[in-house]
Image (cartoon, helix red, strand yellow):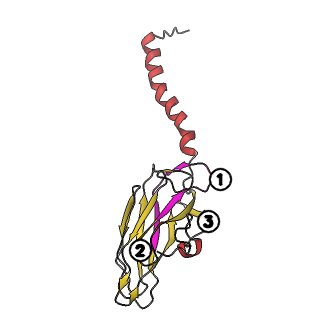
C-alpha cells in the first residue's frame, strides 16, 4: 500500500492549468452561434440627385430582419457591378466607392460591357447587424459625378453579382439588381443613379 501526499502547491498548480480549459470551453457557444456561411440581406438606399447627374447611394449589408445579428467567422467577399446604362457610351461615368467596413478594390472599366467591377471584402470578426440603413450596418457608398459623356448622359445601376462566404437571400438571391429591387427610401424609385 502506497501513501500519496498531495501538497497545496500541487493543488494550486492543477487549478491554474484547469482555468484556461474552463475559459475556452465557455467561449465555444458564442462562436458556434455565428454560421460560417450566413444568410444575408441587401438594401439600396439612394442619397438623392437626379438620374445621370450628381448622385449618391448606399448598398447596405445585414442579416435578414427575422435573423439575429452575427459576427463573421470567415472573410466575406461581395462582387458589385457598376453598369453604365447608356448603350452608345464607350466612356465610364466618374464615380467613387468607399466603405468604413472592410476594403474596396476597383477593376478597370470594361467598355464592351460598360461595367466596372467593385470587390468589397469584409474580414472575419466583422459584426453584421440586422439589415437597415443605420450607421452600424456595413455599407458601400457610391458617389456618382455628373454623367455627361461624348455619347449623352450616362446613368448607372448597381448589381450584386456574387458573394463568397455568405448567401444573399433577401430581397432575392444574386444577382440583386438596383433597377429591380429599387431604393428602400424611395429617393431613386427606379434604382438608377
Q: CA distance from mark 2 to mark 1?
A: 31 Å
Q: What residue is shown with label 2?
A: 117
- The residue stretch that appears in magenta: 58-81
- Look at the image and tell me in which quarter the N terminus lies: top right
Between residue 135 and residue 105, name the one nearer to us: 135
Where is residue 38 drawn, in percent x and y?
57, 56
SS for callout 3: loop
Q: Residue at x 43, y 62 (%)?
A: 140
Magenta run includes residue 60? yes
According to the picture, the residue beneath numbered tag 1 turns out to be: 66
- Find numbered disc 1 in the image and state the secondary structure of the residue it sits on: loop
Q: Earlier in the sequence, mark 3 or mark 2?
A: 2
Where residue 192 appears, x then y in whole percent? 50, 76
Name the residue that disc number 3 marks: 171
**Residue 128 image position (x, y, % from top left):** 51, 52
Q: Which mark sits nearer the N-terminus, 2 or 1?
A: 1
Q: Is residue 165 in sight in this rendering? A: no
User: Is 152 part of what is drawn in magenta?
Assistant: no
Closest to the observer: 20 or 107? Answer: 107
Q: Residue at x 37, y 77 (%)?
A: 146
| Front tag of 3 and 2 | 3
Q: Would you say residue 33 is visible in this rendering? A: yes
Amino acid at each position: 500500500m502506497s501513501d500519496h501526499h498531495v501538497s497545496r502547491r500541487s493543488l494550486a498548480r492543477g487549478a491554474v492549468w484547469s482555468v484556461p480549459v474552463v475559459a475556452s470551453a465557455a467561449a465555444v457557444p458564442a462562436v458556434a452561434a455565428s454560421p460560417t456561411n450566413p444568410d444575408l440581406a441587401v438594401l439600396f438606399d439612394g442619397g438623392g440627385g437626379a438620374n445621370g447627374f450628381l448622385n449618391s447611394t448606399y448598398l447596405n449589408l445585414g442579416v435578414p430582419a427575422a435573423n439575429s445579428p452575427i459576427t463573421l467567422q470567415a472573410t466575406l467577399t461581395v462582387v458589385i457591378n457598376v453598369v453604365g446604362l447608356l448603350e452608345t457610351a464607350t466612356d465610364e461615368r466618374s464615380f467613387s466607392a468607399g466603405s468604413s467596413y472592410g476594403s474596396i478594390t476597383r477593376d478597370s472599366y470594361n467598355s464592351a460591357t460598360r461595367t466596372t467591377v467593385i470587390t468589397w471584402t469584409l474580414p472575419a470578426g466583422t459584426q453584421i447587424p440586422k439589415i437597415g440603413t443605420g450607421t452600424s450596418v456595413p455599407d458601400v457608398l457610391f458617389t456618382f459625378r455628373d454623367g455627361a459623356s461624348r455619347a449623352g448622359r450616362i446613368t448607372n445601376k448597381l448589381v450584386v453579382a456574387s458573394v463568397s462566404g455568405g448567401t444573399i437571400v433577401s430581397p432575392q438571391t444574386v444577382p440583386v439588381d438596383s433597377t429591380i429591387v429599387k431604393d428602400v427610401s424611395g429617393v431613386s424609385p427606379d434604382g438608377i443613379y
